[in-house]
Image (spheres, rainbow, N blue to C red):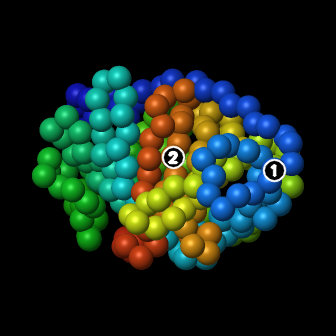
Amino acid sequence: MAGVLAAALTATGCSSATAPTTTPTVSASETSPRSLTQVEAQRLARLPYEVYRHIGLHFDSTLTTAKGSVRFDGDVNYRSGIGYATAIGDGAAFTLQWNSSIFAAWTASATQVEPPPDLPTGKPAGRPLAPAKSLSDALLSLLLQLGRDRPGNAREIRQQGGRFLRDAVVDGQPVEVLQGPRTSGSAKATTDVDYWLGDSGRLVRVEASIDGNPPTEIDLSAAKYRPFLVTPVLRR
């Protein structure tokens, strides 16, 4: 991969966050951060299973680094744990497919704005997915983690710093913005994630700050999800 796109796919960066522990009160419309109520913590805990239950999500995001920007458009199947997307930047484009351990890529036309319905011909270039070393890999890894086959623990989410951040509006619809606990570890980048939840707890956006880099917004839609085929490289 060449130029800004290749650089963005290997850039790294570090961040920190603290959270209040006082018992919150709730108003009709809020703009100030506070700790989560029990109901909000339960909603956040159930979110991964709700995402998994819908099978897949379509996503659209632009990752910005000091070297330039890369736009991603694609889909994630949470039953298989595999994503499929196009990455565009610096006049180059790639079709990507990945799971929690393998990243595969084909060169694509610079005018390609979404992954093709059929897999590209030829064997893709493959390597281990490395979220601790690459901002793009951290973003792709985060997308896989949004859905799981079981809910999280509401008590742990409150104990580990989950917060209500504010009320907001996305595409004319009211949402609440909740911050989950920070993730860190030797195998992944340190990440702060804000979850934008619409009616019935529907996930419409996440905003992730990876290793201290500027927040990256990822717009999500279950309705726009497109099923896809899987390369044999990821079936090994």
Instruction: Report the front residue among 11 and 196.
Output: 196
Residue at (37, 73) in percent of width and height: 224
**Image position, residue 105 (x, y; %):** 33, 48
The secondary element bearing badge 2 is classed as strand
- Quarter-wise, where is residue 93 in the image? top left
- Quarter-wise, where is residue 146 in the image? bottom right
| Residue tagged 2 | 207
Disc 2 marks a residue whose amino acid type is Glu
The secondary element bearing badge 1 is classed as loop
| First in sequence: mark 2 vs mark 1 | 1
Tell me the mark number nearer the camera, choosing from 2 and 1.
1
Query: Visible in this render: residue 78?
Result: no
Instruction: Report the front residue among 193 and 25.
Output: 25
The quarter in which the N terminus is drawn is top left
Instruction: Report the front residue among 173 and 112.
Output: 173
Residue 73 lies left or right of residue 44; in this view the side is left
Residue at (24, 65) in percent of width and height: 116
**Image position, residue 165 (x, y; %):** 63, 47
**Image position, residue 184 (x, y; %):** 68, 35
Residue 231 lies left or right of residue 108; in this view the side is right
Residue at (73, 44) in percent of width and height: 34
Mark 1 surroundings: few (<14), some (14-19) or many (≥20) residues within 10 A? some
| Residue tagged 1 | 24
